[in-house]
Image (tube, grey):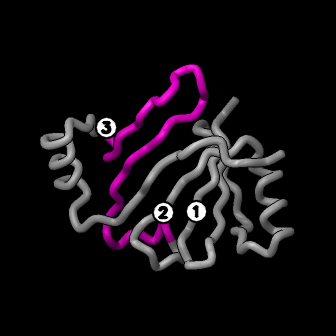
Amino acid sequence: MAKVIGMGGFFFKSRDPKALGEWYAQHLGLSIEGWGGVRFDDDPSRSGYTVWCPFAADTDYFAPSTQPYMINFRVDDLDGMLAKLREAGVTVDDRVEESEFGRFGWIMDPEGTRIELWQPPA
């Protein structure tokens, strides 16, 4: 059965993502990577991990949501999950993206928050 298997990440808008990342590094000890976020390996034996990442305040990556954040969930079967959500009447983006990081799809929750679903590579 297609289901969520973990938190993939929390992405949010920031007036100055670089400065904010530096603040989190200095005060909370986060290790900011070159791409601007942090990768937490909760269990290195799994293919998935959790990401924390500020985006520019004017990003359109969260569109059509007007929320200042996007949640990413790891799923075990992206196609099955998207089919199940469509069947339930959930707003599902037609686009599915594939990369070396895995497969991604997007939905909108009832309050207009964009949810990214991520099936990590095997």
**Residues under numbered marks 1 and 2 in contact, where contact means CB atoms less than 8 Å apart:** yes
Residue plotted at (58% across, 20% down)? 45
Which label sits on residue 70?
2
Check disc 3 and report the residue beneath it.
33
Dividing the picture into quarters, in which one does residue 81 lie?
Answer: bottom right
Q: Nearer the viewer, residue 72 or 94?
A: 72
Residue 30 image position (x, y, % from top left): 25, 38
Which label sits on residue 74?
none
Q: Amino acid at mark 1?
A: Ile
Q: Nearer the viewer, mark 2 or mark 3?
A: 2
Check disc 1 and report the residue beneath it.
115
Residue 107 image position (x, y, % from top left): 65, 66
Q: Nearer the viewer, residue 115 or 60?
A: 115
Q: Residues within 10 Å of mark 2 (few under 14, many from 20)?
A: many
In the image, is residue 60 part of the stretch drawn in magenta? yes
76 lies above or below 42: below
Q: In the rendered view of the protein, which quadrant contains the C terminus?
A: top right
